[in-house]
Image (tube, rainbow, N blue to C red):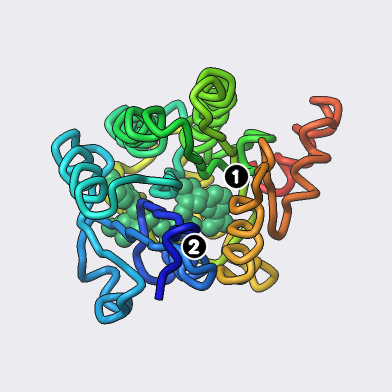
Amino acid sequence: MEDDRTPKPVVIITGCSTGGIGHALACAFAEKKCRVVATSRSRSSMAELEDDHRFLLEELDVQSDESVRRVVDAVVETYGRIDVLVNNAGIQCVAPLAEVPLSAVQNSFDTNVFGSLRMVQAVVPHMATRKKGKIVNIGSVAALASGPWSGTYTASKAALHALTDTLRLELGHFGIDVVNVLPGAIKSNIGDSAIASYNRMPEWKLFKPFEAAIRDRAYFSQKSKSTPTDEFARNTVAAILKEKPPAWFTYGHYSTVMAIMYHLPISVRDFILKKAMKC
Ligand SMILES: NC(=O)c1ccc[n+]([C@@H]2O[C@H](COP(=O)([O-])OP(=O)(O)OC[C@H]3O[C@@H](n4cnc5c(N)ncnc54)[C@H](OP(=O)(O)O)[C@@H]3O)[C@@H](O)[C@H]2O)c1
């Protein structure tokens, strides 16, 4: 039976489709005895969690004001509070910047940046009233060294990192911790999703000779050495649930390499990225 003196933290996570990081985070929070509100665009993508009483499942599209408001209101109505928000929903866009359809750039920012901020704006009033809460934004180590073919994605994650750093300073007044999580290369559906979007893009004019390299970029984080999703989730949840969570937390294959890349002279970084991305 739940001890009323230590109520279970209520955690809401976006983008919890099976096979992805959000799904693994949901399971890892549940293992730590949290009440987990697992959300995704379609309930069927979380079917595995359906009969597990540790999860409340909700459909939520981070691009929709109405969807976000409905779910946040439902969670507050059910549990009376939100202790942790994890902005995990995100999409990768691979394409050369000079030819990528602006609609694809817009869609990436609508999901990765504005979707996260929409969630933040919806939960902050509830957290601020209680002077307590944690907001976790899932960024990316890719934004530490922007390379060819992923400019849209890294720009959106760099923007998210900047928002996260500002939020941490602004929301500290209200007892809200804000954590920037930078995954390294973690096994998930991100490559398949990126290729599905890529296949709907027009043929490149100038960049046709780089077609194979651009396609490869979609799966750069999905190699045999990529970190297993549940390992990443366990370590990330342990960091988030600390009484004083870190401002930045990074974990996974390539996370150290990318931190080093960030500090390299630009000419050296460009040389490495051009080689690695066959540019
Ligand atoms: N995997 C990596 O190596 C890696 C590295 C660095 C950062 N990340 C970040 O980690 C997060 C999770 O990605 P992942 O690797 O687990 O990829 P994933 O398996 O493709 O999961 C992405 C999740 O986001 C959801 N989503 C997309 N658009 C959405 C929207 N408008 N509203 C709500 N949910 C939406 C997807 O839902 P659907 O199933 O409906 O598409 C899916 O549940 C992302 O922010 C990603 O950028 C991943």
Task: Please give the residue where the numbered disc 1 appears in the rendered image.
Answer: 181
Depth order, front residue of 4/31: 4
Q: CA distance from mark 1 to mark 2?
A: 12 Å
Mark 1 crowd level (few <14, some 14–19, many ≥20, 10 Å Cα): many
Q: Where is residue 78, by image quadrant? A: bottom left
Mark 2 crowd level (few <14, some 14–19, many ≥20, 10 Å Cα): many
- Disc marking residue 85: none
Secondary structure of the residue carrying tag 1 is: strand
Label located before the other in sequence (1 or 2): 2
Q: Position of residue 220 (x, y in %)?
A: 59, 57
Q: Which residue is drawn at the image coordinates 68% and 45% (left, top)? A: 249
Q: Position of residue 122 (x, y in %)?
A: 29, 32
- Quadrant containing the N terminus is bottom left
Q: Which residue is drawn at the image coordinates 63% and 70% (left, top)? A: 231
Secondary structure of the residue carrying tag 2 is: helix
Name the amino acid, label 2: Leu
Depth order, front residue of 139/246: 246
Depth order, front residue of 222/73: 73
- Quadrant containing the C terminus is top right
Q: Is residue 117 left or right of residue 165?
A: left
